[in-house]
Amino acid sequence: MTTEGKAAPALHYLDNNATTRPAPEAVEAMLPFLTDKWGNASSMYEFGGRVHRDMEEARAKVASFLGCDPGEIVFTSCGTESDNHAIFGAVEALGPATTVITTKVEHPAVIQPCRALEERGRRVVWIGVRGDGTLDMDAYRAALAIPGPKLVTMMWANNETGVIFPIAEAAAEAKRAGAVFHTDATQAVGKTTGVDMSAVPADMLSFSGHKIHAPKGIGVLFIRRGTPVRPFVLGGHQEKSRRAGTENVPYIVALGKACEMAAEETRDGTLDRIRALRDRLEAGLLAIPETSVNGNRELRLPNTLNISFPYIEGEAMLYHLADAGVCASSGSACTSGSLDPSHVLKAMDVPFTSLHGSLRFSLSRYSTDADVDAVLDAMPGIVKKLRALSPFGH
């Protein structure tokens, strides 16, 4: 009940690119490691050894999900740590003359480390995108022609628009240019096929467990054997001395289960069901006058819709949606406290009248027709009301 004595509206969660509901199966898998199996996986005695074997079984599940060897998996605390490890670790290993190549639409977990490197005197090349959010491959190839050691760090799929970059092609071109290639695949894993390190020549890949229904607080950094990268966290021998700190075994085991489930979803039609829900939501919202979709509508994740409602503020729409029990966002969760317009949409040259009035809806395996109906029932009235109050409205 609310403080006014009225029943709270049903929850309709459509912000799955920010975080996902932990899968009950993943929670169940981790619980024994919070009760009976609480030993330290690095201990020499059998009580810890059993925990270590369970952790390595989970590592094998993650490796199978990514199409790599278990020895190439490093467990971290989150995707942001994985990105920082890849960027700073590779630049330190490659030397002070390293050029970093990235894009203007990256997540803050990549943008801020790259800006920090610029402040330290490192050269960073920022590649732009086209109006539909797709990568400017000509600018990318020109950057790869810069002499000297190079690190490429590029997202697989955009967290705001869902637009997918041609990572297999970009990684192959980086290899031909002698560059080290890292991809932030946080939004791609479990949501699209093709994230297979046996087929994609990326040197490093990072993602976060809480985007695929594992708990918050566990991440992964894939490091291909032979990749020059220094440790980012020092102080112990864990993770083969690549990442110090006592392993978070409960969350590692939960992540292993979540990866098993995500792998199955790429084969069992779950992604098609999610896409159909997203497309129904999109069609209904486009019936509102003057709305438009941001980003390429073919080369995008099946769960993501970024849509503009000109002349009104996204934050105002979110407040009204919350009153209807709908959870959505106006961009990245890591920048939600900022009043600045989305750097992704700015890079795409979205018009000023639409820039502040853009919302992101992102679905998951737990999304339902009722969730879509809640948005479609609420949004026409919200938009009409806010446009009537807007100085830019008609």
Image (cartoon, rainbow, N blue to C red):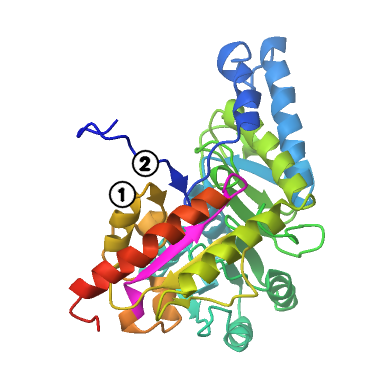
Q: Position of residue 279 (x, y in %)?
A: 59, 66
Q: Magenta segment: does it hold 366?
A: yes
Q: Is residue 9 visible?
A: yes
What's the magenta region? 354-368
Tell me what residue is drawn at x 49 percent, y 55 percent. Answer: 373
Marks 1 and 2, Cα distance to the nearest angstrom? 7 Å
Determine the secondary structure under disc 1: helix
Residue 233: % across, % down: 51, 42
Horizontal relation, residue 350 to residue 236: left or right: left
Q: Secondary structure at mark 2?
A: loop
Q: Amino acid at mark 1?
A: Asp
145 part of magenta stretch: no
Return the mark for residue 323.
1
Q: In which quadrant of the rendered view does residue 11 lie?
A: top left
Say whether marks 1 and 2 touch (CB < 8 Å): yes
Q: In which quadrant of the rendered image does the N terminus lie? A: top left
Residue at the disc numbered 2: 9
Q: Name the residue rendered at 59%, 15% in the picture.
A: 38
Q: Nearer the viewer, residue 372 or 316?
A: 372
When the figure is inspected, residue 321 is found, relative to residue 10, above or below; the finding is below
Note whether 42 is above or below 232 in the view shown.
Answer: above
- Indicate which disc, 1 or 2, sits on the residue closer to the N terminus: 2
Residues packed near mark 2 inside 10 Å, few (<14), some (14 to 19) or many (20 plus): few
Looking at the image, residue 210 sits to the left or right of residue 141; the answer is left
